Amino acid sequence: MSAIIEIDTDHGVIPSASARVEMISAYSDERGSLQTLINCQTNNVALISSAKGTVRSNHYHKTDWHYMYMISGAADYLFRPAGSTEEPQHLLFKKGDLLYTGPMEEHATVFLEDSVLLAMSGHPRDQDTYEGDIVRVVLVTPEEAMERAARH
């Protein structure tokens, strides 16, 4: 079963389950600050914008993983082990949060506000590689996403 855990990102540790990640403390001086998001090798960084009431993902990755950092907005993040019939776990994913999703974790992101996030992945995200690694599921329908956002 998935767990909400803290990750030691200082040492490039990639967790095995979905998690809210405790980030390394920011470095600040008179010039401003520097916030490390992840310390591990990635093959893709994507900037994703999503409208309030929409849903993304509704799939799992066979071998890939990703971190997501919310730049602005908020979302309801749902996840569970692939093939599970349990109710998905939920995390409120808001500005400044960093989340991790491992392989074989069904996940969906319901945007409660207009949002912008960074997604950082282990595999390249060309269409053939991406489609070859995902299995589509339905954790949340578009209608349910609209209802969730309306209640937010």
Image (spheres, rainbow, N blue to C red):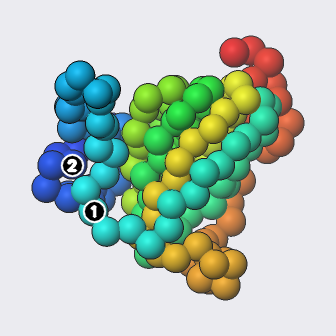
- Classify mark 2: residues with Cα within 10 Å, few (<14), some (14-19) or many (20+): some
- The amino acid pointed to by label 1 is Cys
Q: Within the image, what quadrant is residue 113 found in?
A: top right
Q: Residue at x 62, y 26 (%)?
A: 73
For residue 62, above or below residue 8: below
Q: Can you give x and y, in whole percent of width and height, for residue 114 in the image? A: 73, 29
* Residue in front for this viewpoint, 31 or 96: 31
In the rendered structure, which disc, 2 or 1, sits on the residue that comes first in sequence? 2
Q: Can you give x and y, in whole percent of width and height, for residue 127 in the image? A: 69, 78
Judge from the rendering whether residue 128 lies leftward or rightward of residue 34; answer left or right: right
Quarter containing the C terminus: top right
Please report contact status of discs 2 and 1: CB closer than 8 Å, yes or no.
yes
Q: What's the mark number on residue 40?
A: 1
Q: Residue at x 21, y 48 (%)?
A: 9
Q: Residue at x 22, y 27 (%)?
A: 28
Farthest residue to the right: give it.
Answer: 143
For residue 110, above or below residue 112: below
- The residue indicated by pointer 2 is 9
Q: Can see residue 43?
A: yes
